[in-house]
Every structure is written in C-alpha cells, then in structure tokens.
Image (tube, helix red, strand yellow):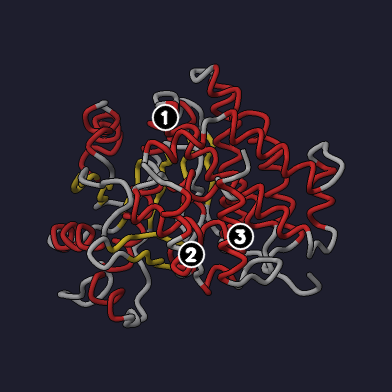
Amino acid sequence: MDNWSFYNPTHIEFCPEGLDRAIRGINYQRIALITTPGFTKRGVVAHLEKALVDRLAIVCDTVQPNPDIDAIDTTAERLRHIAPDCLIGLGGGSSLDTAKALARILTQPEGTALSEHLRAGLPFKNERALPVITVPTTAGTGSEVTPFATVWDFREQKKHSVTGNDLFPIKAILDPTLTLCLPESLTISSGLDAISHALESIWNKNASPVSIGLATQSLAISLKVLPGLKEKPFDLANRSAMMSASLLAGMAISQTRTALAHSISYPLTLGFDLPHGIACSFTLPELLKYNAEADDGRLKRLAVALGYEDALELADALKRLLRSLGVSRFLSRCELKEEQALALTHEMFTPGRAVNNLRPASVEDVHAIVRNAFNAG
C-alpha cells in the first residue's frame, strides 16, 4: 500500500425524513425518474412529483430486479425523445444501476444500443454521461456512491459492468425511513451485500488505508445491527445505522472493485435467481479463511478491531451470522444444491474479479471454497 489514491466526488446528504426537502434543492430542469412499479404504488413517486413540480419530465417505473440490457435499451429509446438533463435513480441497486446505464447510453449517438456495445465489447464514444442523483431505498448495494452499474444479459446468460468516473453520482440522498418498509428477506440480502462489499474491499489488492478504514467502520456497524433488524425491523435508529454501513462499504468498494465472492455469485444469480447479497455472502467465511493464509496483517487488524483474536475467529463469527440469518434457507428456496453450484465453478472464476483477491486463486481453489461453504454446517 505504498502507492494509493482515493477519489469519490459524490455529494452525500443523509437526511432522515428529509427527502422532500432534499429533492426540492435539485436544480435540473428536465429530470427523468427511474424507479420500480412498487414506489409508484406506495406513493413515493407522488411525493417526488410534488417536490419537483414541472422539473420532472418523465417517470419510468418499469425497473425489474437484476436489470436486463434489452429492457434498458427499451427505456433509453423512450427517454431520447424527452432529452433529460438529469436522471434520478430511486430504489435498490437495480434502479440505481439502471439510471447509471441510461446516463451512459443516452449521451451516445442516436441509435446506439447498450446491448449492442456490451455483447460485442465495443467501446462507447467519449461523451460524458448524464448526471445521476441516487436515492437508495435499501441498505446494501452502495451503488449510490460508486461509478459502476451492474447489468445483466439474460439472453446470453452474462453479467456486465458499465463503469467510468463520470458515472459517480453527483449526489446521493439517503433517507433511512425509505428502508422501513423492506421485507425481512430484502433487509437480510441487502445487508449481507454491504458486508460482502466491506470484506471484499479489505482482502483486495487495490485496498488503501482509506478504503480499509471505511470498510472496517462499516463492518463494526453492520455486524452488530443487521441481526437486530431481523428482530426489530421498524427500529429507525438501526435502519439509519445500516444505511450508514452500506454507504461506507460502497465508498470502499468504489475504489477497489469486488473480488472472488462477487465472481462466484454471478452465475448463481443468473442461473438460479439467487438474491445478489446471498450469492455474494454465503462463501465469506471460507474466503476469509482462504485469504488469511496470505495475510499481510490487514485481516488480523480487522479481526482485532472487531473484537476477535484473529481472522479465523472472525470467520467463525461470520459463519454463525449467516446461520442466524437463515442463508441456507435462501439457497434451498432457490433450489440450489451443492452439486449444481460446483458444476458452475469455471463460470465462477471471473479473471477481472479474481485478480483483485489478496491471495491468488485458481478454478480449483474456487471449487474448494464453494464446496466448503456448502458443508460448513
């Protein structure tokens, strides 16, 4: 870590019960709101319409979980005629990532399709993306402060990333009251996504003292708060704390990118519709033990900071956490069995993610990690 840098230009506004005020402070004149049908049904969109008045040019409330590139292209064609000067992403990671992907494609020449570029691996024209404002409604993805958008190609069974410093949201508005209505399953899966981001950014070759500090603080909060939210889901103090933990993990991962846990997760989400946070987290204890064998001191320091003697003791605590949150039930619900997961080992080894891991890994290592995760008990 002798040479490192840190860059995150997103203006963050943490405002419990202050969403309307924060939205009214936006100065753009032709805003497109990108969200899901649920937020229209629950009346949140109506609140934003009232706050933005005639500055809201269009509401696109068609985002589905794990946004597909063909669906994004359909939305982009609809938006080209509106010519928005800003996009607001309201929702979980799928809405925020869709807004970022749209921000990229809408500044490309007319007729340009996101699917065409991603499937063919074509570069985008050097045009700055539209500004994006993010309003997260889950505490997990951290997408509100990252320059990445995860999008999916279900036709080709592939996951893609749209990225660039111009995709850092210009502003993130965090109102934890928006997470009060989250069902238990989404609270758990998104919370585990935040824990995955924090750990992945620590056992990462791109880590820095700043990113490790952010991730360590995130874990100090999330490991304590997430189990409590299962018992008291309407506790606003804990919801606020979990949203802060997600934010800190997102800031860390914005610098390092993800590593093996996320690499392993992608084919499981594509093939079995396993929630992203569960797909990323069920291997965390085994990955911590794996990386501990190449520890340069950071994992030992993390464990001590969190109140454990060493990384192996922290791995045992993570195992107990996953058990208490019912992660195995998520796997069963998606009918994912050990032999099915192991059959995807080669697809789980994504070089662009595996190379970030603190300890170098092979396909055989991934196979062993997944097998051990299923047999951890």
- Report how far apart the C-alphas of labels 1 and 3 lie in the structure: 40 Å
Q: Name above or below for residue 9 compared with residue 228.
A: below
- Would residue 51 be visible to someone looking at this image? yes
Identify the mark nearer the N-term, 1 or 2: 1
- Report how far apart the C-alphas of labels 1 and 2 lie in the structure: 37 Å
- Would residue 247 be visible to someone looking at this image? no
Residues 341 and 63: in front is: 341
Residue type (three-letter) at the residue carrying disc 3: Ala
Residues 139 and 13: in front is: 139
**Residue marked by disc 2:** 345
The percent position of residue 5, horizontal first and vertical second, equals 69, 69
Q: Nearer the viewer, mark 1 or mark 3?
A: 3
**Residue marked by disc 3:** 368
Tag 2's secondary structure? helix
**Residue 178: mark:** 1
Q: Name above or below for residue 237 compared with residue 256.
A: above
Q: Residues within 10 Å of mark 1 (few under 14, many from 20)?
A: some
The percent position of residue 241, horizontal first and vertical second, equals 61, 31
Kindly identify the residue that appears in the image at 67 percent across and 39 percent down. Answer: 318
